[in-house]
Image (cartoon, grey):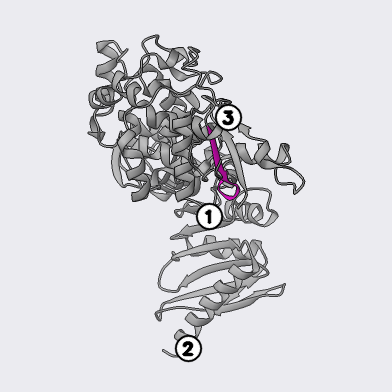
Amino acid sequence: MSAPEAGKRVDEETTGPEVVDRKEDGEDTASPSQANVKEADEETFPAQTVDSEETAADETNSEIPSLLSLPRELLSHIFTFLPLEDRMRARVNKLLSDIESSSKYYLDTVSVQEPSTATISRPMRKCPLECIDRIADRTTAQWFEIMMPGSDKDIIKSSVKYSIFSRINFSRITLKFRGSFVGQEFMKDEPLLLNELSKKGNFLDFGPFLTEDQIHQIYKNILDGSMRVRHLMIRGIPTGTRLAFLDLIGITFVNSEVRWDRDFQVYKTSYCQTHDRFDVFAGRLQISFDDDTSSKYDYGVSIILHPTEQSKLEAVHVAQKDSAFRNNL
Amino acid sequence: MVLITLVSSDEQNFPVERELLKQSGTIETLIVNMNLDDEDTDAAAMPIPLPNVKGDVLEKVIQWMEHHKGDPVKEGDNEDNNAEIVVPQWDDDFFKPAMYGSKHLELTVAASYLDIKNLLTLSCKAISNTFKGKTGPQIREEWGVPNEFTPEEEEAIRKENEWSE
């Protein structure tokens, strides 16, 4: 007998009488779930033995179509490959609808800025807010952007937006309010919110509604590593709030000069006469802020705890290049 | 070249190159448990029974593993990017003839049982691709899924899905 060829079936002629075809013996190994496989298909490819698997169809219908003969676990897995709109349309049956209602969604971005519509990606498209509300508990977004509505905190709290905001998971959140006063009121009324957001997201991107004490609280959360947050950005911050925060962490800023009672490097990287930007590095911490002498508001403050020394060095390199560019102007 | 013999549920024998079987977590575990990698063990005399996989399915699985010999095996069950995965042309051609029938579904079940992560991923992705852009009635017709909804439930879902059509 010649040596068997790899990957090819060794049939009865080459292996001898020990090879037994169970079908010829009349032993029916097909499970009940295979009985309804399309006739034409059975001719070319008899149904497989999956006796040990509980199939999804067993739970629903004795007239079992082929797709539903898959174990529920595999149907759930198949759903994870479908984008949101296709998964919604795939709810064509009670079982599949049930599978959708327990499946998780991973979206690049969820942006909720309009009253009744959200924008998601990828692929990018608009969908009703109710759809995001439906899946919020099961959704993780890389970047969640939300514009909170209204001028009355009760409206904010009762809205679908608030519900989505509190339930969705995210890595980065951009939180904005229509008017910084609304944001300040909202934050006052939700003293635990900043800690909750610091636990959920590693990048908090806020409008100008935080007080210096609230910024300081997040700063401490970033430094002590007990929460997920590693990056805070505040846009359009009042100059007074920015200076008060710097004061709280021991940085004094007088006449465009930074002083700090610890080892640090600072680079001045501004682009115009009225607007200076400062990048301060201490250990793996980077604090960047703007000083706009023409306005009561600065462009912003950013606090980053770099995950590695390498990423900090890369940020230092960028600051050095920008600083050299500025000095050559 | 070391060959290891796999035995399907219908007792067909398939001698397979040892290297290929690294793609299957289940078979890899069996090889370790049966000491088939030991020099002192006569691997040829110790076939591995696979009672949950029929011969014609196993033949397809081996064909797929041969094409993907040396591919890095997917680690973990990270679902974050599943919607972005693209089925390569060769695999699409491999799956297509059996799509919408039991053959592809059986291959998917076998990939799960044998713990061949890359095959399971691509096979499930290929099935999910058949849903893309289809309406509910089209999906039901193509996959033979019964409609158990009342007219009211059906209408509620249709309204919820209006934005996606």
Residue in the image at 47% along x and 15% along y: A31
In the image, what residue type sits under mark 1? Answer: Gly
Chain on which label 1 sits: B
User: Which residues lie in the magenta part?
Assistant: B13-20
For this view, does A31 lie left or right of residue A131?
A: right
Q: Are the residues flagged by discs 3 and 2 from a single subunit? A: no
Residue at disc 1, secondary structure: loop
Front disc: 3 or 2: 3
In the image, what residue type sits under mark 3? Answer: Leu
Residue A319 rendering spot, x and y as whole percentages = 52, 77
CA distance separating discs 3 and 2: 72 Å
CA distance separating discs 2 and 1: 54 Å
Residue at disc 2, secondary structure: helix
Q: Is residue B48 magenta?
A: no
> Which residue is tagged 1?
B70
> Which residue is tagged 3?
B50
